[in-house]
Image (cartoon, helix red, strand yellow):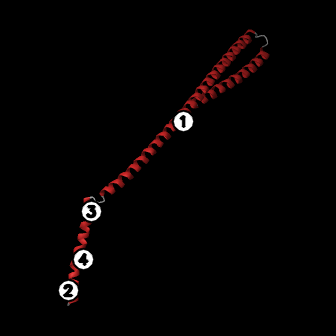
Amino acid sequence: MSEKTELAEKKPVAVQEKPKKLWDGALKMVRGESTAQLIENFTAEMTLVAEGLCEDQGNLRRDVDKMVTEEDRRIQAIQTRVEAAETSLEEERRAHDRDLTELRNRLAALEKQAANKPAVAGKEKNRKGTIIRDLTVLIAIAAGAWIIVTVINKFF
């Protein structure tokens, strides 16, 4: 029976020691025996994180500024090319308008000349038909070129 009593006495001591160790551990955390060290470690780590974030943000700002500058250069280059294309198209349009006006004037002169010479009717009609056909082809070419210039102008 003496063994049983020893076991009975040991159990309450072991049961009492466990909560006491937990309590002492909790008190150490609350009392701050290692709190100062924990705060110092936490502060050092947070400072390191904040410095890293600041550096990352600075790098991102530089990258964004560089991208904005490149995009501005691209926009300026595109605007310059568009202006050059518009100028070129305007010059082409004027040239086509002049050619078309000249062809109309020639056609009117030829029609007037043909109206004044009715003596050789068969040959004149044949020549007149050939001239009108040739002028029609030339006008069609000029009109086609004008249409192509207009289409190019719409897409640029």
* Pointer 4 or 1: first along the chain: 4
- Count of residue discs: 4
Using the image as rendered, state which of residue 9 and residue 107 is in the foreground.
9
Q: Quadrant of residue 133?
A: top right
Q: Which mark is residue 14?
A: 4
Q: Amino acid at mark 4?
A: Ala
Asked if the residues shown at circle 1 and circle 3 are in contact, with their CB atoms under 8 angstroms apart, the answer is: no
* Pointer 1 or 2: first along the chain: 2
- Residue 132 shown left or right of residue 65 in the figure: right
How far apart, in angstroms, are the residues tagged by discs 4 and 2?
15 Å
Q: Which residue is mark 2?
A: 5
Q: Amino acid at mark 2?
A: Thr
* Pointer 3 or 4: first along the chain: 4
**Of marks 3 and 4, the one in the foreground:** 3
* Pointer 2 or 3: first along the chain: 2
Horizontal and vertical percent position of residue 34: 31, 59
Q: What is the quadrant of the C terminus in the image?
A: top right
How far apart, in angstroms, are the residues tagged by discs 2 and 3?
35 Å
Crowd around label 2: few <14 · some 14–19 · many ≥20 (10 Å): few
The residue lying at 44 percent from left, 43 percent from top is 57
Q: Which residue is mark 1?
A: 70
